[in-house]
């Protein structure tokens, strides 16, 4: 569903617009009250000021909720006592709704009980119908109190709903931030780990052969220079995305399966011969990037923990499902210190994003195997 379909067809009013609507409703309500017949013996001179006091303050109920409610309630009660047109406390209920919507919650106010009692009294009044003159005043008071209780309960329910929606929005925002942090950390790990592992291996080679075979040490230093330059370029691209956003950054395309031969060449510099077997065709950019990163991390692990060794990479995609298998003939256990990194975790997370399966561990015949399979939409 498009985002525009989720938006309300009505424009969202500003605070000034809402106050304007309240002013219009207050004026209309005052005219309605003036059109109602006054009770028997009611002083006509009190009609206009009491109607104005009961209706017009509603125009500013959003600015001063409690004072407006107090003024309207007093005017409505005076009108009821003097026999002037009775508004069933509808205006006071309208003002009380704003109070309930904006005031902080008090634990000692039984909102649920108030709502239930108000509903019972309103229902009972509707069923009972007209009553005698002696009970009329009491009935009006009870019905008015029920209207106020219903308004209070409705305001509190709307407030709780908004608070829940705000909490859910904050939670979704926190989850989005956490997900973005995880994505950034995963990309940084994938970008840096492979190159740094290769640099570390070649630096070790250079140290051991510097005196005996200086030409070989010089070759290792050239590999370190080339790899570090490439890593710096990729880091700048990633930082450019973080600073300006992917839409604004003038960056090279994200790596994909077409970049695997270059990955194999860099691994060969560290003593790991990579045998590539790729049959995938055209892939969505996100799928191609995930597949490349999984292979990159698996090969990096071979460089870090098994070099020199042979490694076989097999990638298959049929338009519905991606399958990646990376095996090596090195030791099945990791012999170098510092092996408890986040590489396997990162690969697993990439696969889980697509709802796939991931396994990694020593092979019975020797060596280590990484296997990933996940569905995707072509």
Image: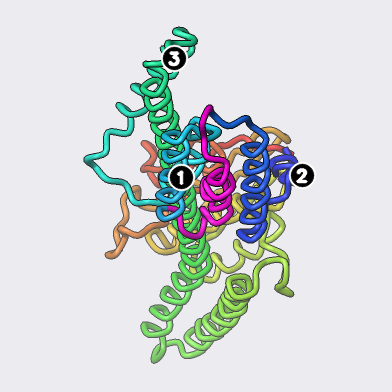
Dot 2 surroundings within 10 Å: few (below 14), some, or many (20 or more)? few
**Looking at this view, is 23 or 230 the one in front?**
23
Say which element carries label 3: helix
Report the predominant secondary structure element of the magenta stretch: helix
Indicate left or right for 222 with 318 as reference.
left
Earlier residue among tags 2 and 3? 3
For the C terminus, give its image quadrant: top right
Residue 209: image location, x then y, percent: 40, 84
Residue 67: image location, x then y, percent: 42, 55
* Residue under label 3: 125
**Looking at this view, is 6 or 194 the one in front?**
6
Earlier residue among tags 1 and 2? 1
Earlier residue among tags 1 and 3? 1
Residue 75 is marked as 1
Is 260 above or below relative to 140?
A: below
Which one is closest to the eye, mark 1 or mark 2? 1
**Residue under the point 68% across and 66% down:** 246
* Residue under label 2: 281
Residue 75 belongs to the span the image colors magenta: no
């Amino acid at each position: 569903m498009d985002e525009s379909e989720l938006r309300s067809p009505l424009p969202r009013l500003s605070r000034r617009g809402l106050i304007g609507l309240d002013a219009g409703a207050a004026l209309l309500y005052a005219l309605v009250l003036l059109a109602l017949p006054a009770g028997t013996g009611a002083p006509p001179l009190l009609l206009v000021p009491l109607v104005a006091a009961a209706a017009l303050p509603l125009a500013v109920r959003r600015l001063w909720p409690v004072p407006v409610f107090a003024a309207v309630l007093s005017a409505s009660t005076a009108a009821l006592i003097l026999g002037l047109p009775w508004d069933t406390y509808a205006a006071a209920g309208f003002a009380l709704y704003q109070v309930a919507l904006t005031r902080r919650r008090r634990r000692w106010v039984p909102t649920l009980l108030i709502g239930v009692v108000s509903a019972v009294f309103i229902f009972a009044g509707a069923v009972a119908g007209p009553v005698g003159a002696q009970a009329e005043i009491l009935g009006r008071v009870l019905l008015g109190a029920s209207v106020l209780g219903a308004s209070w309960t409705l305001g509190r329910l709307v407030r709780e709903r908004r608070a829940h929606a705000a909490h859910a929005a904050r939670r979704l925002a926190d989850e989005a931030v956490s997900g973005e942090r995880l994505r950034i950390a995963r990309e940084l790990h994938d970008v840096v780990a492979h190159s740094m592992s290769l640099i570390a291996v070649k630096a070790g080679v250079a140290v051991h052969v510097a005196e005996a075979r200086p030409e070989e040490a010089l070759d290792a230093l050239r590999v370190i220079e080339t790899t570090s330059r490439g890593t710096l370029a990729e880091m700048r691209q990633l930082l450019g995305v973080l600073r300006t956003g992917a839409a604004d950054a003038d960056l090279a395309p994200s790596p994909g399966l077409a970049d695997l031969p270059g990955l194999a060449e860099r691994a060969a510099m560290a003593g790991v011969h990579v045998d590539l077997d790729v049959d995938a065709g055209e892939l969505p950019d996100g799928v191609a990037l995930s597949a490349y990163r999984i292979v990159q991390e698996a090969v990096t692990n071979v460089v870090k923990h098994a070099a020199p060794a042979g490694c076989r990479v097999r990638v298959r995609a049929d338009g519905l499902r991606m399958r990646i298998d990376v095996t090596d003939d090195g030791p099945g256990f990791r012999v170098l210190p510092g092996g408890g990194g986040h590489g396997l975790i990162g690969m697993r997370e990439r696969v889980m994003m697509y709802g796939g399966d991931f396994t990694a561990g020593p092979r019975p015949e020797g060596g280590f195997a990484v296997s990933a399979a996940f569905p995707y939409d072509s």
